[in-house]
Image (cartoon, helix red, strand yellow):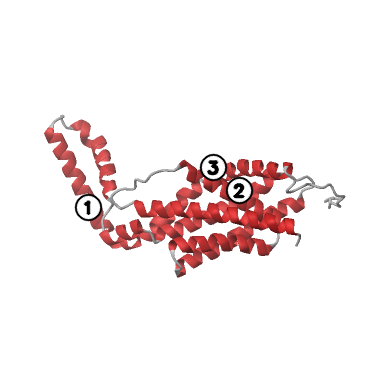
Amino acid sequence: MPIYKTHKLIGTYVLIALLAWQFFRYVDYVLNVITPESFAFDFEAIAVVNFVVLVSMISLALSLFRKKRWELVTSGIVGIIFLLFFGWTYINLIGVLIAMSLFEYARFAGVEEIDQRTKINSRMIIRRGATGVVLAFFVLVSFAAYQSPVARGIAEAEQLPSATQQLMRSVVDSVIGSQIPAGPEKEGVINQVTSETIKQFNNILKPYFQYAPPLLAFGLFLILWGLSWIFVWLSVLVGMGIFWILKKTEMVRIEEKDVKAEVLVIE
């Protein structure tokens, strides 16, 4: 392998490792700071930027380096960093294997986009790869949430988080608040109804609190997957910028070649 290509590979994977480390560091922080009593945490906009750049870099690397062995290197770097933060458990190893298969899907989709087109389109290359990459990270985050302190706390407490009480109080206030004259009596009635309602819910759900970790993880995954299109398109925009820089600095180049194309004819 030419030495200049080796430098490109090393530089790319060092950057991916740094971005992945920062991403999982922030995920670890969020999962450890939130509690069953409060889901509050410090939002860092830079974490979103970090994730978008990470997805863009991996999508481009998988497509441009093409070979399966480089996909294994990429998924290996991401997987090891994930395991360093969240533990070398069987459940985490399963998550890493799922992520590896999704990285392979992203590589295949990106390479196929390059091979099947007569004109290179960086937007389509990155978009096809980014979907699998984003999904892989969301799977890993969900596996981390499954083992998080907040999930174990809900299961062990066998009662709804205290944050639920505030939500329930708002619902009770909107339903019966207008029917009760303002004053101390109103607050007392609302508090009593809220307390009794929460108690009833806890009694009904008590046998199912043991399933809180998988339900929390699955719910988080659905929420993240619902937002995935935002991250995919942001990654496409950033990736197109990175690809443009790579072309301008001649780190990659596009050559024209004569190719034969199949045409379907119906007679």
Question: Looking at numbered disc 2 in the image, what kind of residue is underneath it?
Answer: Ser
**Neighbours of disc 3 within 10 Å: few (<14), some (14-19), many (20+):** few
Q: Position of residue 160 (x, y in %)?
A: 28, 53
Q: Residue furthest bottom?
A: 90
Which label lies toward us, 1 or 3?
3
Q: Position of residue 143 (x, y in %)?
A: 45, 60
Which label lies toward us, 2 or 3?
2
Which label lies toward us, 1 or 2?
2
Label 3 sits on residue: 230
Q: From the viewer's perspective, is 129 left or right of 24?
A: right
Q: Position of residue 35 (x, y in %)?
A: 31, 52
Label 1 sits on residue: 200
First in sequence: mark 1 vs mark 2: 2
Q: Which mark is residue 56?
A: 2
Task: Find the distance from the CA under tag 1 to the CA under tag 3.
Answer: 39 Å
Q: Nearer the viewer, residue 173 or 146?
A: 146
Give the secondary structure at mark 3: helix
Quadrant where the N terminus lies? bottom right
